Amino acid sequence: MIQRILEVICCSLADARAAQEGGADRLEICARLDLQGLTPPLNVIQAIACEVETPARVMIRVNDGFTASTAEISEMRAQVESFAPLPIEGIVFGLLDKSGRLDFSSMDRVLREMPSHWKWTLHRAFDFAAGSANEKLAAVQKHARADRILTGDSWRLAPPDGLRFIAGGGLDATNLRESMNSPCREFHFGRAARVRPDLTAPVDAARVRELRGILDQKLDKQ
């Protein structure tokens, strides 16, 4: 039986509670969805990690772009180090260099602060990076640190060995069924999991449950 994973963006403990109640398999904890997500406050991560059992990955991002200065890289390293004692699954993170390519050297400076058991989702910096999808996938596979790539379009491809795609960007209850015909097995929701299609709105357990039901209904037919 094919298992499909439902991931929900959460910005608060209330969001995380609602996502868990609705049947989410994984949480992405972040702040400022209007900026495509920034690193959330430590106290928010602590509250969620201590109360909610659903596995969570935390966004590490300190500006609204995908490049970072030396000082910002140091800031992200400190953030990861401060989160290390918490019972989270890993981080959501990615950087580009000044030429627009995936900056593995800078990413490694942050990743080395991760506990060895943490996992890493390379976020949509992948989509914005220069190069073809296949070229970028080969580079990520060679780097061999990420286990997942959150992407708005490349999830339609068959994932290379050792990597899984998370489909994100505009998915909702109306187009999810079509998206599920792809090789992708993991799906990421922001607006569609909220009480209204507004990034400032709270997560709604009923909407998460609706998405969960679509995924499970499709599974029952396979």
Image (tube, rainbow, N blue to C red):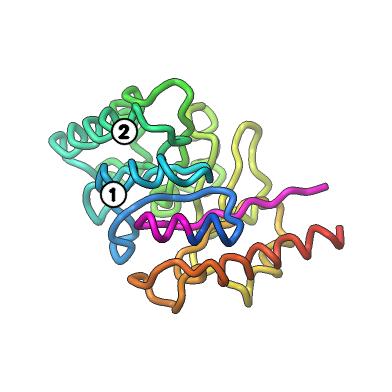
Question: How far from the left and from the top, in percent, is residue 23?
Answer: 61, 57
User: Of helix, strand and loop, which one carries label 2?
Assistant: helix
Is any part of residue 129 visible from this angle? Answer: no
Q: Amino acid at mark 2?
A: Phe
Does residue 123 appear to the left or right of 74 in the view shown? right
Does residue 119 appear to the left or right of 134 in the view shown? left
Q: Nearer the viewer, residue 79 or 195?
A: 195
Residue beneath the point at 45% across and 47% down: 131
Question: Badge 2 is on which residue?
Answer: 83
Distance CA(mark 1)–CA(mark 2) = 11 Å
Q: Quadrant of the C terminus?
A: bottom right
Q: Quadrant of residue 173?
A: bottom right
Residue beneath the point at 84% across and 60% down: 220
Question: Which numbered disc covers residue 40?
Answer: 1
Q: Nearer the viewer, residue 215 or 157?
A: 215
Instruction: Tell me if label 1 and label 2 are in contact, CB under 8 Å.
Output: no
Is 191 placed above or below 99 here?
below
Q: State which region is magenta.
A: 1-17
Q: How many marks?
A: 2
